[in-house]
Image (cartoon, rainbow, N blue to C red):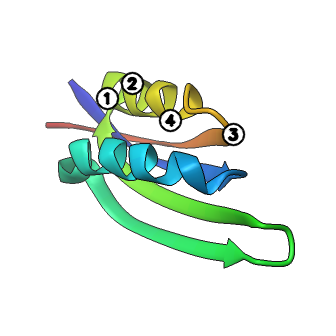
Amino acid sequence: MENRVALIGIIVEDKNSVEKLNAILHEYGDYIIGRMGLPYAKRKISIISVVVDAPQDVISALSGKLGMLPNVNIKTVYSKISTKE
């Protein structure tokens, strides 16, 4: 299966979702290249960027699980480059 690099942008609007979000990210930790989180106190939100290198179906599953969390908004951007693993 081909691996792709993707950036998952996450905005968390309620801190009650953070524990579940972190559990999901931990579950996919083998695929995560890096992660950066920015608390935005003025708006009471958190902004997280997660970069992954994984098969398309794994990225879709991760994005789907994150998108189903309450008060969490996500968008996924894929690179055009893929590699066979």
Side of 43 where 31 appears, left or right: left
Label located before the other in sequence (1 or 4): 1
Please tell me the numbered disc located at residue 61. 2
Instruction: Name the kind of residue labelled 1 in the image.
Output: Val
CA gap between label 3 and label 2 equals 18 Å
Label 4: how many residues lie within 10 Å, few (<14), some (14-19) or many (20+)? Answer: many
Label located before the other in sequence (3 or 2): 2
* Residue shown at 50% from the left, 35% from the top: 66
**Is the residue under label 4 in contact with that under label 1 (CB below 8 Å)?**
no
CA gap between label 2 and label 1 equals 5 Å
* Residue shown at 62% from the left, 51% from the top: 10
Residue 41: image location, x then y, percent: 76, 78
Side of 3 where 50 appears, left or right: right
Please identify the quadrant where the C terminus is shown.
Answer: top left
Toward the left, the furthest residue is: 85
Q: In the rendered image, which residue does mark 3 sit on?
A: 71
Q: Is residue 10 above or below residue 60?
A: below
**Is the residue under label 2 in contact with that under label 4 (CB below 8 Å)?**
no
Please identify the quadrant where the N terminus is shown.
Answer: top left
Question: In the image, which is nearer the foreground, mark 4 or mark 2?
Answer: 4
Residue 43: image location, x then y, percent: 85, 68
Instruction: Name the kind of residue labelled 3 in the image.
Output: Asn
Toward the right, the furthest residue is: 42
Label 2: how many residues lie within 10 Å, few (<14), some (14-19) or many (20+)? Answer: few
Q: In the rendered image, which residue does mark 1 sit on?
A: 58
